[in-house]
Amino acid sequence: GGSIEAGETAQQALVRELMEEFSIEVDQTDLDFFGTFWAEAAGQEAKQLRMDVFIVNRWNGEPTPSSEV
């Protein structure tokens, strides 16, 4: 799902999700903000989803998708 947990910033959530889903380590200083985008949720026209997008400039490890991907 890639959801932000309570008390977490978008950057912290991204770092956590990349570790959980791709087994790579990313430092927040290696993220560049790209933009914020909004879209309707599939099948839920009244619900708007927000997506903060970042460019990951550097990471440690070999990206390996988990069963979540």
Image (cartoon, rainbow, N blue to C red):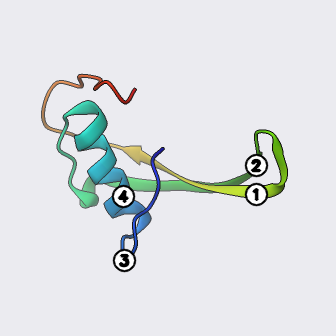
- Tell me the quarter of the image containing the C terminus: top left
Taking 63 as reference, is 1 above or below it? Answer: below
Asked if labels 4 and 3 touch by Cβ distance under 8 angstroms, the answer is no
Residue assigned mark 3: 7
C-alpha distance separating marks 2 and 1: 6 Å
Taking 27 as reference, is 60 above or below it? Answer: above
Asked if labels 4 and 1 touch by Cβ distance under 8 angstroms, the answer is no
Q: Secondary structure at mark 2?
A: strand
Lower sequence index among marks 2 and 1: 2
C-alpha distance separating marks 3 and 2: 24 Å
Lower sequence index among marks 3 and 2: 3
Asked if labels 3 and 1 touch by Cβ distance under 8 angstroms, the answer is no
Residue assigned mark 1: 48
Q: Which residue is at a point 30% across and 42% down the rendered structure image? A: 18
Location of residue 16 in the rendering, given as x and y in whole percent from the top left corner = 27, 52
Give the residue type that dot 4 points to: Ala
Residue assigned mark 2: 39
Residue assigned mark 4: 13
**Callout 2: few (<14), some (14-19), or many (20+) C-alpha neighbours within 10 Å?**
few
Asked if labels 2 and 4 touch by Cβ distance under 8 angstroms, the answer is no
- Circle count: 4
